[in-house]
Image (cartoon, helix red, strand yellow):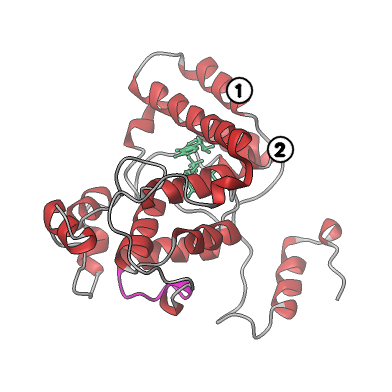
Amino acid sequence: MKLDATRRTRSEMQAYLAEALAGCYEGPPTLSPIAGGRTAAERQLNAFDARRYSSRNHVTRGHVSRLSPYIRHGVLTLREVRDAVFARFGRAGESIYKFVFELAWHQFWQEVYAALGDDIYTDIEAYKFPPPIWEETLPEDVARAKTGLVCIDESLSELYTTGYMHNHARLWVAAYLIHHRKVHWTVGERLFFAHLLDGNPPPNALSWQWVASTFSSKPYYFNRQNVEKYTDGEWCRRCPARCPFDRTYDELAVELFGQA
Ligand SMILES: Cc1cc2nc3c(=O)[nH]c(=O)nc-3n(C[C@H](O)[C@H](O)[C@H](O)COP(=O)(O)OP(=O)(O)OC[C@H]3O[C@@H](n4cnc5c(N)ncnc54)[C@H](O)[C@@H]3O)c2cc1C
């Protein structure tokens, strides 16, 4: 069947996908609820209250802008977003500062890419711990969002069904895949790039390297307390698994990296 998305309604597109992808996935394929285009981008920008951004790290009720797909595809520029926030909320305050700081991170990754080109896909620095023999394929349970760990499966399910994942959840999934499952960061990088509507080589590859420690001074990892704090304990209460994150940071460092 020829794909002509331009003249199709949403339900026609859904039907087209169901037919084209029949048998490829478990259950019917879904369209992301995130709408494209300038009108949707402006709506999202106008709905964003930057004064609440200091709650950003909270995964289930943190106030983030969800503007990344529009920024990624050039529907909104970083400057435009910054200026809209300044015009509506002024320049003062921790939340505004934090938000503009994150926009600057985006710019920074772009500039690293301009300098390094496709070298962002290879280790920029040595690992800051003795690296294991890395797995080079994506584990099946991760591909299906069925690891049995609610914090990982909820995050992956959101990615697979909507094309979005909260920044903190991205960090948890990346740390889990790299440090607990010993999967090479490039495998996770490809997974995210394939599914994220904001999938973008510089922030994606360089964030995976940041978690792995090949573009930072230490590996990123997290413990159960961190998940509890940023989901109000809800995800952990629902989790039936024996939690591999239920340790102190020192215990995890010894377990994962062989050193405190
Ligand atoms: C493993 C991993 C992979 C990532 N892959 C991508 C990616 O492919 N594309 C992408 O745009 N971002 C990526 N990020 C960065 C960040 O997670 C997303 O930009 C952010 O979650 C997008 O959601 P938002 O628009 O609600 O962000 P908000 O918190 O509302 O931030 C506003 C904007 O600032 C920029 N921004 C925010 N945080 C970051 C950050 N840490 N690094 C760079 N820019 C940031 C984005 O353009 C974002 O839209 C990744 C982070 C991690 C840890």
Pick the front one: 8 or 103: 103
Q: Considering only vertical position in the picture, is 142 above or below 75? A: below
Disc 2 under 8 Å from ligand 1? The reply is no
Q: Quadrant of residue 58?
A: top left
Residue at image point 38% right, 59% down: 173
Distance of label 2 from label 1 (alpha carbons): 16 Å
Please, what is the three-letter code of the amino acid marked with disc 1?
Arg
Q: Residues within 10 Å of mark 1 (few under 14, many from 20)?
A: few
Mark 1 — residue?
79
Give the mark nearer the N terminus: 2 vs 1. 2
SS under mark 2: helix
Q: Considering only vertical position in the picture, is 8 above or below 75? A: below
Mark 2 — residue?
38
- The residue range painted magenta reads 142-149
Please, what is the three-letter code of the amino acid marked with disc 2?
Arg
Residue at image point 55% right, 30% down: 107
Q: Considering only vertical position in the picture, is 251 above or below 66? A: below
Residue 61 coordinates in the image, percent (x, y): 34, 46
